[in-house]
Amino acid sequence: MNAIFEPDNLLELALKKAADDPASRPQFFRELLDSKVLIVSAGEKPRLVNGVVPEGAKITIADVEHGGRRCIPFFTSAARLPSGTEYLLLDAKALFQITRGAYLIMNPGVAYGKEFFPDEVARLLDGSVFEPRERYVAKKATQVMIGQPSDYPQELVAALSRLYGSIAEVKRAWVAFYQNPERDKEGGLLIGLDVEAGDMDRISGQSGIVIESVPKKQKYVDLVRYDGSGVSGYFSKQKPFYQRSAIRQFLGKFTQ
């Protein structure tokens, strides 16, 4: 495995940041979907247009064994391939579309890479990776227990703080432990977000990518928009773990 990884392009820079910091993973997914990647053909090369495999071209892609299964490898730059290897350039989104249902692996044998499972590829293609994984709506009035976590999720709130620092719409964020008998007997974490209603789904989706990437003891993490009512009212008397500074809010109005 390569000991040194010097990013050759924006995708590799995003990959390295995402591997080192879960807060950077939403941006990595966005960069990947807008990037071209390299594949190794196992058959006759298709006709190229401006050096790129055009839409509708027939391609046979080489595969490799990884983790006990056959995977389709792809690469983020020529520097990640053995010297002299012939390759084809293809839009990452097109690669995901033509290999639906397959397991893929980015940069096999390289210090920075990633395995992609079929369900994750499907979520990247339909955009649901950036949306909440599921929505819970209380079917009836339910009393919940809520309070500060006895085992504070320091790593999680630190990662979310870094993410929210890059999202101008997030004003404040809180964390609590809560137990909802309709949801789960063991209880989990609740993240309160001070955002506009129209921004909640998008920000929840990005939060979910980070939450899934950080080890935690709790079984689940839910998010709720803070509006001072219902369960979110608990946060009105609590100190947020993230608060956007007044100067950042002011500057954000001119950078959106």
Image (cartoon, rainbow, N blue to C red):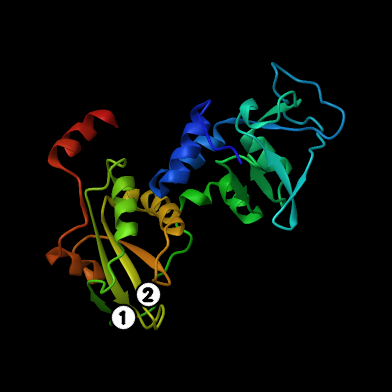
Query: Is 13 above or below relative to 48?
Result: below
Kind of element beneath mark 1: loop
- Where residue 217 appears, as percent x and y from the top left, is 39, 70
> Residue at the right extreme?
44
Position of 14 with respect to 156 (left or right) is: right
Rounded to the nearest angstrom, the CA distance separating label 2 from label 1 is: 7 Å
Query: Is 86 above or below relative to 145?
Result: above
> Residue at the front extreme?
3
Q: Which residue is mark 1?
A: 141
Query: Is 130 above or below relative to 239?
Result: above
- Where residue 213 appears, as percent x and y from the top left, is 45, 56
Q: Which residue is mark 2?
A: 138
Q: Quadrant of residue 241?
A: bottom left
**Quadrant of the snapshot with the C terminus:** top left
- Which of these two is toward me, 179 or 56? 179
Query: Is 102 above or below relative to 4?
Result: below
Amino acid type, mark 1: Ala
Position of 232 with respect to 108 (left or right) is: left
